[in-house]
Amino acid sequence: MLRHQPRTESAGRLAGSSKLLRAMNESATLAHLLDRGTLTRGDLRELTGLSKPTTSDVLRRLTDAGLAIVVGHTRGGPGPNAEIYAANPAAAYAVAVSVKETTDLARPEFTAALVDLAGTVHARVHDRVDLVKADPLVAIEEIVGRLTTLAGLDRTGISHVHLGVPGSYDADGGVIRHIDIAGFDRAGLVAQLGERLGASVAVENDVNLAAIAERGRGVAAGLRTPERAGGDPASSFALLWFGEGLGLAIDLGGSLLRGARGGAGEIGYVPVGLPGQGPRDMQELVGGPAVVELAAAHGLTASGAADAVAAAVDAAAHPATGAGGRAEAEKFLDELACRMGQCVGAVAGVLDPPLIVLAGEVAQAGGEELARRVRAAISSTIPLDITIAVTGIADDAVLLGAVDAGLRTVRDSLINALRANVPVG
C-alpha cells in the first residue's frame, strides 16, 4: 500500500496542475478578448503563446460556457476563412447610476444606464426622485427595474450595480460620508441594496468617476496609459468639479487617491479667510449657491449656477447685448474666475499636477471663455506652470465613469472566477 501512495499524490498534483493551467489559459484568453474586441485563433495564439490545439480547446470551453462567441469569418486571405471570436456581450450586464445634487437636497436627480459586457447601452433613464416620500433603496431598485424592463431583460441578469454619489464611501464603516442628499448617509444602505438587487454593489465618489471618464474618453486620454506610466508624474492629472457642490479627483498614473476613509478630494470643506470674515470655506466661496448670489449681484438672474454662467458667457460674446449688461456679465465672469482660481491655486500648490481639468456644470457652461479667465486670474499670483483644460466630456461624466468602472468590475470578476478555477463549462 505504501508503495502506491506516492503515485496517488503525484497524480493528484498533476490533476491540480492541469486544472490550474487550464484556468490560467482561459482567463488569459478571455482577458484578451475583452481588451481587444475581436480576435481570430491565430491572433490569440500570438498573444498567449499557446499551441493551436490548446487555443482551440480554450475557445471551445469559453464558447460552451457562454463567455465567447463567433462573430464572423476572415475573408480574402490564403487558406480557409478563420473564425473571428469576441467576448459574449450577453455574458454579464451592469447598471451604472449617477446621483446628482439639486438645489433641493430631498429631490436629487438620478441618471442610470444598463450596459452589456461589451459596453453597449441597452437602456437609459433620467428622473428626479422625492426622497421625502421614497426610500433611497426603493428608488434605486425601481430604477433598476425600469432599466431591465426597457432592455427586455430579467433583473436576475444584472450582476453588478455601480453607484456614483456626491460623497465618499467608507467601506469599513459601511456608510456613505460627506453626503447631503436625504437618506444616503444611512449605515448599511449599500449592503441592503446589494441584498435587494441580488447583485454586487460598488459606490464611488462622483468626481472620481468623472476623472475615470476623463482619462478614458476626455482630455486626459492623451496622457500615457497607466501600464506605461512607470510612476512618471506626467501620467497624472487633477480634476476640479464646479457644480452645486465642489469636488476634486486626484489621478496618479491611473490610480485614484481616495484617502483613509474615502474623503480625499472633499475640497469644499477647505477653509478660506478668517472666522467671521467672508466665506467660511471653498463651498461658500464658489459652490452653486455662491455663484447664483454673485450673478444676482451683477444683475444676472438664473435658476441655477450653470444657467447663470451660460447667460453671462452669451451676453459677453454678443455685441447686441446692451453695453451695461455686457459689462456686468464680464465683471461677473472675471470675479467668478478669481474665485475658481483660488481652488486651482490650492490644488496646484499642493500637488503640482501636469494637468488640471475643469469639470462640472459650471465649468462646462463657462467653457473655454471661463477657463481663459481662470488662467489669467492665477497667472499673476501663482508662480507655477499650470496647464488648465476644460473637460472633454459633453455627456454626464459621472454616469460614463460609473459605466467604465462597472464594466471593469464585471470583467475582472469573470476573469478572476476563471483564475480561481471555477468551472466554465
Image: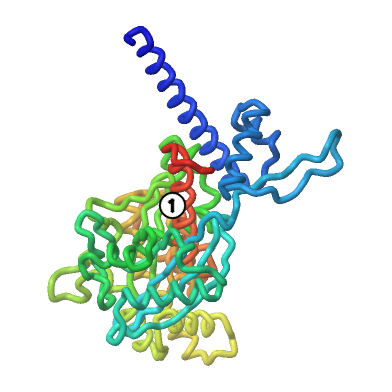
Query: Which of the 4 image quarters holds residue 128?
Result: bottom left
Residue 76: percent from the left, percent from the top? 86, 41
Residue 263 visible to an observer of this rendering: no
Q: Is residue 165 left or right of residue 319?
A: left
Q: Residue furthest front?
A: 1
Instruction: Judge whether 333 appears above or below 221 on screen.
Output: below
Residue 52: percent from the left, percent from the top? 68, 28
Pick the residue in front: 39 or 380: 39
**What is the basis of the colouring in this image?**
rainbow
Residue 103: percent from the left, percent from the top? 33, 83
Quadrant assignment for the C terminus: top right
Q: How crowded is mark 1: few (under 14 residues within 10 Å), some or many (20 or more)?
A: some
* Residue highlighted by disc 1: 409
Three-letter code for the amino acid on which mark 1 is drawn: Thr
Q: SS of the residue at dot 1? A: helix
| Residue at image point 54% right, 33% down | 25
Residue 399: percent from the left, percent from the top? 46, 66
Q: Is residue 257 left or right of residue 32?
A: left
Instruction: Judge whether 361 appears above or below 252 on screen.
Output: below
Residue 331 visible to an observer of this rendering: yes
Pick the residue in front: 11 or 380: 11
| Residue at image point 41% right, 13% down | 7
Instruction: Judge whether 143 appears above or below 237 on screen.
Output: below
